[in-house]
Image: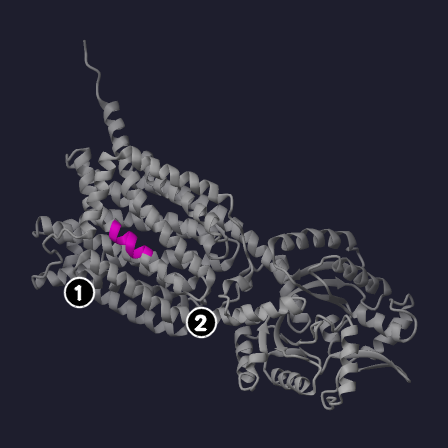
Amino acid sequence: MRYAQQITRFKYAVLSVILIITLMMAYFMKDLSVNADVLSYLPDDDPSAMLFNRIGDAFGGNSTVIVGLSGSNVFDEEMLYKVKEITDSIRRVEGVGYVTSLTNVINIRGSDFGIEIGRLIDEFDIPSDAEILDSLKAYTLSKEMYRGNLVSEDATATLIAAKIRNGYNHAEVVGEIREKLSGLPYQEMIHYGGMPHTLYELSSIILRDIKNIIPFAFLVISLVLLAGFRRIRGVLLPMATVLIAIIWTMGLIALLDFELTMLTNIIPVILLAVGSAYAIHVVNAIVAEQQQNPENALQRAVSYIVIPVFLAAVTTILGFLSFIAGSYLLMIREFGIFSAIGILFSMILSVTFIPAILALSKQKGESLAKPLRNNFFDRAPEFLSGIVLHHKKPLLAGWMVLVIASVIGITQIERRVDLVDYFKKDNLVRQGENLLTEKFHGSNPLYVSITGEVQDPDVLKLMERTQDFMKGFEYIPYSQSVADLIKQMNDVMGEGELIPDDPFKIIQLWFLLDGQEIMDQLVSPDLSEGLIQAYVSSVELDVLREIENSFDKWVKTHSMEQHQLAYTGIPVMLKRLDESIISSQTYSLIIATILVIIMVSILLGSFRKGLIAIVPIGITLIILFGIMGMTGIPLDIATVLTGSVTIGIGIDYSIHMISRFGKGCREGLGLEASLKNSIRTSGKAIFINMLSVSAGFAVLAFSNLVPLQRFGFLIAVTMLVAGMASLTLLPLMLIKSSSSKKSKTKKPLST
């Protein structure tokens, strides 16, 4: 009661502090930026990530933007001029390192003077004669270096590949490339691919989602609250509270110089759906007290509700904080930390801002309470209490059937890390990747680094053997290294397509390659490291596992004192991402469950109550993963969060039911009366909150990112399941537990 009195007494000071903090955080929100690069959130000490970044620094960038151009025949004068136009446009973009296309790619052939190293097509003298073009087509398609890499085997599509230098913002570079090409009159023929373009689209979608989804979620939740409380103020107070919490959280993200990611992007939706729960319970408690006795109703309600709200917030915060210890990806950790902070803000505001506002309203004689009406939100909890009390066996049988079906569904869960799968089918990323997969060798670069004296015949032959090893995988149809160029030149000299044994011959051939742009992508300036570049055409998990296992063995077997091998690339990063999904799911669930049980047991003063509180959540988790298996929703970077989020949010319902049930028992109402009272008061708030949270997350179905659509659907469903479990199964357990406890405390009759 004292806390409520202090809030009432210092209401102006409380509201002034909240206003100042809100204005300050709103100011910092202007500095929010987006980083959609999932791979940049790998730990700094990850060896593969470190090598990937080092290769980018040493070889002109490790991220390639791919522009595809499709038509009936690439080897047409008009088409080749289009290739040149696109190539020139991309070259002028700041941050682009090397651009490779048909009009500037290196070509090694023999001539009357020996070896001639020039361009496949002279960009300043593009042929127009049909015979010359046909001859050029035949020659190009006969070369493995071009076929399937720069031009499709059917000659209906060609690629222009541009490397982005390290240190430049990939999204900005891609954006400028697309802007330059947007003015070209043949847009329908242009396709985009490569990881930088994928990340650019992710950034664009994140910004669109923030602008479109948050207002929609706000509207949907407001409508649910209006239907539940039937008072405008019953809507405005919770929504104002959560809106302030969002401003505080997003302002803090900007203030601490963090960037928005695909996950932190949905924190506002989480706070709208979850943070409003505390405000709903506060408002509901005040309404209930005002309807019973208006005198000091505010103080009584706040004094009671502070503890359950605090317990609910703490357990939810622990659920989100479990991502810190359980996640490999930094972006998941950031999501957990800032979601937890946002929940904390929501809780603090619910027990300060709302009572302070209502204290001001009290001075004007206003009240939240209205005469009771027997509407849906009143009838539904009453109906459920009747089922619990009078239909126990059918109720338990129904839950048992759901659990058994879900256990079967769990065995069907699959994992997926393909970033292209994050986009809708009509998205440019999907369209571009389809072209690259169907007509070319894919867009996921794989690198093998060989350190040693690159001009040494033994090192070049090791490159050759490594490339032969890579050709053994059907999803790595082609690779390129400086060894290929030396072999081509040696073949033109009439000595066969092989690496010369004589170091002097290699040096002579090497001299002819000096100054060629391609050399900067294949060999370090001091000739101490060579790079084999390849593209992987599949990112299926079986493929990623095979790459890791096979390349690990090859690297360990062939690394020696004089030359060391190492490998990295997008497939390796995606394999790390898959590992992080599994570790995140496993550790976060275990940690969240243990922390919640311990915290609830301590705060409720009973380990038994802690175990009872977690049972509805355990059943909800089984049903959650069962739904994923039955519907084909995979574990990915977003859906991996659903388990711990379910624990963190769903435990609130159990806490409020247990708290209200215990309050009734302490007041001497008896078990059945306590149950009815719990469902009538806390049950109603749970019912409203269950629907509002589900509606809020269901709004994510309108996201342009497929993982967020799945995430929203799963949380919406599991919140309904968790709410219903707390309103049906939990009361049964409370009655059973309380009855058993009473029977044990009865003394035997003396004879």
Asked which secondary structure carries label 2, the reply is loop
Out of 479 and 710, give the one closest to the viewer.
710
Residue for badge 1: 12
Which comes before the other along the chain, label 2 or label 1?
1
Q: Is residue 750 above or below residue 171?
A: above
The reply to whether residue 247 is visible in this rendering is no
Task: Specify the segment rendered in magenta.
Answer: 687-694
Q: Position of residue 114 (x, y in %)?
A: 90, 81
For residue 208, which numbered disc appears in the image? none
Evaluate if marks 2 and 1 touch, with contact meaning CB atoms under 8 Å apart.
no
Residue 582, x across and y down, in percent:
53, 49
> Residue 308 lies in magenta, yes or no?
no
- Residue at point 23% right, 52% down? 281
On the image, which quarter does residue 132 sit in? bottom right
**On the picture, is 241 further left or further right than 628?**
left
Camera-side mark, 2 or 1: 2
Secondary structure beneath label 1: helix
With respect to residue 428, does 8 lie above or below? above
Q: Amino acid at mark 1?
A: Tyr
Numbered disc total: 2
User: Pointer 1: residues within 10 angstroms few (<14), some, or many (20+)?
Assistant: some
Q: Residues within 10 Å of mark 2 (few under 14, many from 20)?
A: some
Amino acid on which the number 2 mark rests in the picture = Ser
Residue 390 is left or right of residue 185, and the answer is left
Magenta stretch, main secondary structure class: helix
Residue at the disc numbered 2: 33
